[in-house]
Image: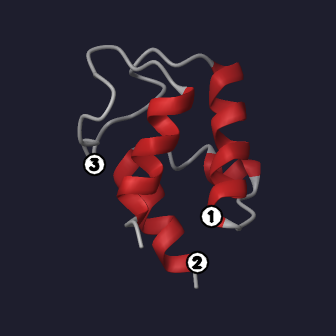
Amino acid sequence: MSSTEDRLRALVDSSLEIEGRSQGQPLTPDLNILDAGVNSTDVVAFWRLVCEEFGIEIPAEEFAELMTTGDLIAYIDARSG
């Protein structure tokens, strides 16, 4: 089974273009996707993909606070069974 980080990296690779990051490159825990040039429309689409991939509901208000990959991974791991 893939780790949360591996699954999240696959979602990032398939749906986001992050300035200075090549596909397949490990995610930096303090990478903030908004600071990396991702527009708000893509962030919303990514939020939906994350919820679907991990089978969890993340309220929009909470997702807005989870803009670093490290925070998002910790959130998912704490709520995934």
The quarter of the picture where residue 45 lies is top right
Q: Between marks 2 and 3, how big is the CA–CA gap?
A: 18 Å
Choose between 13 and 78: the one closer to the eye: 13
Taking 21 as reference, is 40 left or right?
Answer: right
Amino acid type of the residue tagged 3 in the rendering? Pro
| Residue 12 higher or lower than 35, as above or below | below
Residue 79 has which mark? Answer: 2
Question: In percent of the image, x 58 and y 77: which residue is there?
Answer: 79
- Give the spatial CA distance, label 2 vs label 1: 9 Å
Q: Which amino acid does label 1 sit on?
A: Phe
Q: Are the residues flagged by discs 2 and 1 in contact, CB closer than 8 Å? A: yes
- Quadrant the C terminus occupies: bottom right
Q: Dot 3: what SS? A: loop
Judging depth in this view, the residue of 1 and 49 nearest the camera is 1
Q: Which amino acid does label 2 sit on?
A: Arg
Q: Mark 3 points at which residue?
A: 29
| Disc 2 packing (10 Å; few <14; some 14–19; many ≥20) | few
Tag shown at residue 54: 1
Q: Which residue is drawn at 44% across and 32% down?
A: 13
Instruction: Classify mark 3: residues with Cα within 10 Å, few (<14), some (14-19) or many (20+).
Output: few
Q: Residue at x 70, y 59 (%)?
A: 58
**Pointer 1 with pointer 3, Cβ within 8 A:** no
